[in-house]
Image: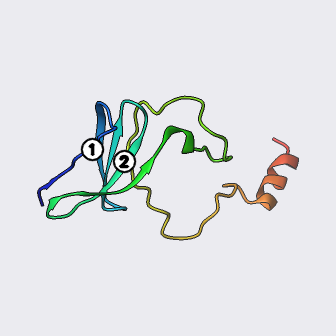
Amino acid sequence: MKSTIYPPPNADETKIVRFCSVLKQMIVLVRSGILYFYRLEQGTSVMVRQINPGELRDLDQIALGQLVSTFEVGCIEPPRYDCQKTSTVPSDLQRQNDYSED
């Protein structure tokens, strides 16, 4: 599908344009650090959301102290099974090896 993206009039130089397949949206980063999200439609894309640099937070909800300079879009698949990493040596066998004499 071809779609034209028009940045808002207050946007300055475009730095990065990426497509997010999970959101099915284009993400545009401009020099001022503002992120624009566009929904792709036939002909002209529609801006869905704008995130200003002051709105960006880290995991602890602390505001970022600098402008975003780059970003990547990735997809992480969760494991297929609920699993937990355990010791490779059973504890009974480990105790036997600790007390054995060579």
What's under tag 1, amino acid-wise? Answer: Pro
Horizontal side, residue 3 vs residue 81: left or right = left
The label number, if any, that marks residue 22 in the structure image: none
Circle 1: is it few (<14), some (14-19), or many (20+) Cα within 10 Å? some
Residue lying farthest to the front in this orientation: 9
Secondary-structure class at tag 1: loop
Colour mode?
rainbow
* Residue at point 63%, 39% (across, down): 63
Tags 1 and 2 in contact by the CB under 8 Å rule?
A: yes
What residue sits right under mark 1 in the picture?
Answer: 7
Q: As rendered, which of 84 and 39 lies closer to the eye?
A: 39
Report the quarter where the N terminus lies.
Answer: bottom left
Residue under the image location 54 percent in, 29 percent down: 66
- How far across and how far down the image is residue 74, in percent? 39, 50
**Residue placed most toward the observer, 9 or 15:** 9
Image position, residue 27 (x, y; %):
33, 48
Q: Closer to the N terminus: mark 1 or mark 2?
A: 1
Q: Measuring 42% from the left and 30% from the top, which residue is drawn there? A: 69
As helix, strand or loop, the secondary structure at mark 2 comes to: strand
Instruction: Work out how far the residue at label 1 is from the one at label 2, CA to CA, in angstroms.
Output: 8 Å
Q: Position of residue 56 (x, y in %)?
A: 55, 43
Mark sitting on residue 36: 2
Q: Viewer-nearest of labels 1 and 2?
A: 1
